[in-house]
Image: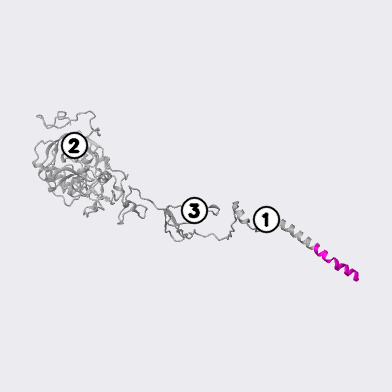
């Protein structure tokens, strides 16, 4: 027993050595396997610098936490501005935006402004517009009304510009050829008496006075040379193109040194402006209502009418020419004949409709040559100065009379939408201050034969238009005059 214990004690160091060797071998195998599987790394001196030099990317540790999706979009908080100076434009707000895959998108340097929106809706960025060199600040400041239409700063009716904002030239009305000749101008006492009776009985006129007819007497023969007259009254669109060609302040004294018309929104307080459908927005002339584009222009001074006609190479008709176009050589009482018909013209009877119709309305009331609305709709300025006694002073068989050489009031002719049929007769005369624009006075232009290069409607195609000239046999010898 003692001998066995002795041998065992002598060999114990050998078993210890064998255990150490086996343990180190197993540990080495395990470590080599872990290193081969990239489960264990060894931080050796100089190893980090070598890896960086080789350009091996490093892996950043990201921790992603799931968040519930918001009901409404939210705007991330803006980042702090950098203190680093830069020569490029700086955005007023930097809004970090996540693109697809979570990649950050670098914001552009284009200036943006954030517009406030209703609660629950995030703000939207809109690029700030840049005003071009030709855009006016007054136009850029125009706001929109409740219906999405332009509204004025005073809260008044919407401003409506011409069909084209670039339009500065007038498109003239077609001309109609009127054959010259002799006719009886003015009215007789019997005719005037019947007119007053019709005014009282048929039209229930309260203020029907025979004195209204006295300046149209006596009837007297007049001769006019052939001429042209516009088929219809000048429309608002046409006159607005003329005003816009003068510029925003030209209407104040751009018509022979006088005011052209009454307009709303002008720099001066004009008591006639409220009756006008024309409006100045500070830069451009337009209309207060779309309905009046093709309706006859009113609220125009005589000087405005005269300047418009001159601007297109025409002129206002003389009083004699106007009556010749309305009456014909046969002396009609109305443009269509001698019997009054309320369906052929716009007057205050049978009812006052409160304004004129378009310039090409009442086709059953045109003259045989095709001229519209010489009775009713709006009255029309003519070129003559007014004198209540002129018909008694005009020489017999005068050719192309042009009225008194001077005066303080101008003649206007034809009835209008606000007047009784008494005033729509082709012989009736009225007068007004040439500087006083009226809401019922418009105009149309005329032209001499020599001033027209193209042949208008109804004119002879061959040269040598007949003109009126005195002769021993009578006031008119067709074709023997100057040839026009």
Q: Is residue 308 visible?
A: yes
- Residue 140 as seen in the image, left or right of residue 4: left
The mark nearer the N terminus, 2 or 1, is 1
Marking on residue 38: 1
Give the label, 2 or 1, closer to the camera: 1
Above or below residue 110? Residue 316 is above
Which tag, 3 or 2, sits closer to the chain's start? 3
Q: Is residue 16 magenta?
A: yes
Q: Quick check: marks 3 and 1 in contact, CB under 8 Å?
A: no
Residue toward you, 101 or 482: 101
* Secondary structure under the numbered disc 1 in the rendered image: loop
How far is the residue under mark 2 from the one under mark 1? 116 Å
The answer to whether 439 is drawn above or below residue 333 in the figure is: below
Q: Confirm whether residue 299 shows in the render.
A: no
Q: Which mark is residue 328?
A: 2
Residue 19 on image: x %, y %: 80, 63
Among numbered discs 3 and 1, the one appearing first in the sequence: 1
The residue range painted magenta reads: 1-17
In the rendered view, does 26 fall on the left or right side of 196?
Answer: right
Mark 3 highlights which residue?
106
User: Circle 3 — which element?
Assistant: loop
């Amino acid at each position: 027993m003692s001998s066995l214990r002795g041998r065992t004690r002598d060999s114990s160091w050998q078993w210890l050595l064998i255990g150490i060797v086996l343990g180190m071998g197993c540990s080495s195998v395990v470590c080599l396997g872990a290193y081969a599987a990239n489960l264990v790394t060894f931080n050796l001196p100089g190893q980090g610098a070598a890896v960086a030099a080789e350009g091996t990317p490093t892996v950043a540790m990201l921790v992603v936490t799931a968040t519930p999706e918001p009901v409404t979009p939210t705007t991330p908080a803006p980042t702090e501005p950098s203190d680093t100076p830069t020569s490029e434009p700086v955005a007023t707000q930097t809004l970090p935006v996540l693109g697809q895959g979570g990649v950050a998108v670098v914001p552009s340097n284009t200036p943006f402004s954030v517009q406030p929106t209703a609660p629950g809706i995030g703000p939207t960025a809109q690029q700030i517009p840049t005003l071009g060199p030709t855009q006016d600040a007054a136009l850029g400041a125009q706001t929109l009304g409740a219906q999405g239409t332009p509204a004025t700063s005073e809260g008044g009716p919407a401003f409506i510009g011409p069909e084209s904002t670039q339009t500065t030239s007038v498109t003239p009305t077609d001309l109609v050829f009127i054959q010259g000749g002799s006719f009886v101008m003015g009215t007789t006492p019997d005719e005037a008496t019947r007119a007053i009776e019709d005014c009282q009985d048929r039209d229930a006129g309260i203020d029907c006075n025979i004195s209204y007819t006295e300046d149209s007497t006596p009837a007297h023969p007049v001769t006019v040379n052939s001429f042209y007259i516009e088929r219809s009254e000048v429309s608002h669109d046409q006159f607005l193109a003329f005003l816009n060609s003068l510029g925003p302040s030209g209407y104040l004294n751009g018509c022979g040194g006088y005011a052209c018309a009454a307009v709303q929104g002008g720099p001066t307080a004009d008591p006639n402006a409220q009756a006008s459908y024309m409006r100045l927005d500070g830069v451009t002339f337009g209309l207060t209502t779309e309905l009046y584009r093709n309706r006859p222009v009113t609220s125009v001074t005589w000087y405005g009418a005269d300047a418009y006609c001159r601007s297109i190479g025409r002129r206002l008709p003389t009083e004699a020419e106007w009556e010749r176009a309305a009456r014909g050589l046969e002396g009609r009482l109305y443009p269509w004949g001698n019997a009054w018909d309320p369906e052929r013209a716009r007057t205050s009877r049978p009812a006052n409709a409160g304004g004129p119709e378009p310039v090409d309305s009442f086709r059953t009331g045109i003259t045989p040559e095709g001229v519209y609305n010489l009775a009713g709709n709006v009255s029309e300025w003519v070129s003559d100065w007014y004198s209540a006694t002129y018909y008694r002073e005009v020489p017999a068989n005068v050719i192309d009379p042009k009225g008194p050489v001077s005066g303080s009031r101008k003649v206007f002719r034809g009835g209008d939408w606000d007047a009784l049929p008494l005033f729509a007769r082709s012989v009736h005369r009225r007068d007004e201050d040439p500087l006083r624009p009226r809401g019922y006075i418009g105009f149309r232009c005329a032209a001499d034969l020599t001033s027209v290069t193209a042949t208008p409607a109804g004119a002879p195609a061959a040269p040598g238009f007949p003109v009126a000239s005195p002769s021993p046999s009578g006031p008119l010898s067709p074709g023997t005059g100057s040839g026009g």
